Structure formats: structure tokens, C-alpha cells
Amino acid sequence: MTTLIRLEITRTLRNKRYVLFTVLYPALMYFFFIHAYGTDQVAGGLPVKTYFMVSMATFGAVGAVLTGSAQRISLERRSGWVRQLRLTALPGRAYTVAKIAAGAVTTLPAILVVFGVGAAQGVRMGAAEWAGLAVALWLGSFVFAALGVALGYAAGADSVQTVVMITYMVMALFGGTWFPVTGTLRTIAQVDPVYLYNRLAGFTRPGQSLDLVAAGGLAGFLVVFTAAAAVLYRRDTRRA
């Protein structure tokens, strides 16, 4: 399984589309948002620079695992690669876990690059806050890695890109990625894992601790998406 994880990570990091759309694009969007809102404004209870640093880091992380995992799995199913793996000694659960783990590792560049840009633009936090936020966002990305695997088994190769993009954009829209969620929209956002993911940034405010409600919600989504991925994998096995 370790070999498969290394292979998946290497394939992703060598993909130019991955570098452009999930690492560089969120960093460029960060510049756009902080200047569009004004660098002295407050968004979602946080300084604009901090709020959009987190939202663009999560945007890149979610994009990295959704677009990468789902599309690759769907193509591997069509090409017969998954069928070949089933003939090896690798258990099905190991393949699913390897996909989730490899996907989550590839979110680190997206998170760290945006953090670097944020620091260069004047975001100031203590070393413990920087490290804590990076770890929180990285662990949170496992939720979307599991969703990416589930979508890869749920959609066919011809439709997976459309399914992923609609899922990705709807979650970002209601999750506070593009603007702070307020009023009635916040009620809807409570069931959006991206909204919970972005709420992990709250402990960067002085005197605030990690949002345990958001962390618990993400843990619940991780269980649901992992279970869905396992069920869909078994269904695909029976069809093969």
C-alpha cells in the first residue's frame, strides 16, 4: 500500500494542471480578493487578509483532492487498471485508503503556498498558530479526499468532470470561500463541509480555541464519505 501511495503522490505532483489550478490559481485569487475587499476591512470576524488566506487555502486543498482523485479513479476504472489491481494481493480497502491518504498529502502544497503569500502580504500569527492552522487544514482535507474517491466510483469517465465541478462550486459558494456567510445562508451552510472547513480558521482570533463543533462535523463527514467510497468500491467490484 505504501508503494501505491508514493506512486499516486508522484503522479499528482508531476501533473502541470495540478500545479496551475490547485497551487498557483488559489494564490492568485488571494491577491484578487484582498484588494477587492480592501486590506483594512474585516470579513467573517477576521481581517480580510487572514480570512481569504484560509478560504483560498481550503479552496486549493479541496480542488486538489476532488479533481485529482475523482477523475483519476474514473479513468482508471475505464482503462481496466482498477480491475488489474483487484487481481493482486492488495485488499480493496487498502486501495481506497491509499487513494484517500495520497490525495490528502497533495493538499499540502496548496495550503503552504497560500500561507506563504499571506505571510508576505502581512498576515501575522505566532508560530504555534501558523503550525496549528496548517495541521488543522491538512487533517480537514482528508474529508474531501474521501469524497473525491467516492465521486470517482459514483460517476463515469465521461461525466465525472461535470459532477466534480458542480459539487466543488456549490460547496465553495455556500461554504464561505468567496464571501463571508451570513443570515439565512448560514443556516444552509451548516450542512456544507467546506463551511465547517473554513471555520477552523476561527482559532486564529486572539482568545479563541479550535471550533470543536466544526471539527466534529468534519469528522462525521469523513466517516460518511469513507463509508460511501467503500460501498461504491464494492459495487464497482461486483460489476467488473
Image: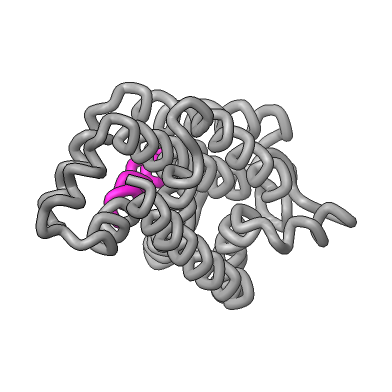
Judge by depth and name the residue closer to the eye, 186 or 169: 169
Q: Position of residue 99 (x, y in %)?
A: 30, 51
In magenta stretch: residue 114: no
Horizontally, residue 130 falls left or right of residue 205, namely left
In the rendered image, which quarter contains the N terminus? bottom left
Q: Which residues are magenta?
A: 101-113
Identify the residue at image location x=61%, y=64%: 202
Residue 5 seen in render: no
Q: Position of residue 203 (x, y in %)?
A: 57, 68
Residue 103 seen in render: yes
- Locate residue 231: give its quadrant: bottom left
Q: Position of residue 222 (x, y in %)?
A: 48, 65
Identify the residue at image location x=67%, y=55%: 46
Horizontally, residue 112 falls left or right of residue 95, namely right
- Locate residue 208: give its quadrant: bottom right
Q: Is residue 164 above or below residue 206?
A: above
In the rendered image, which quarter contains the C terminus? top left
Q: Is residue 212 above or below residue 141?
A: below
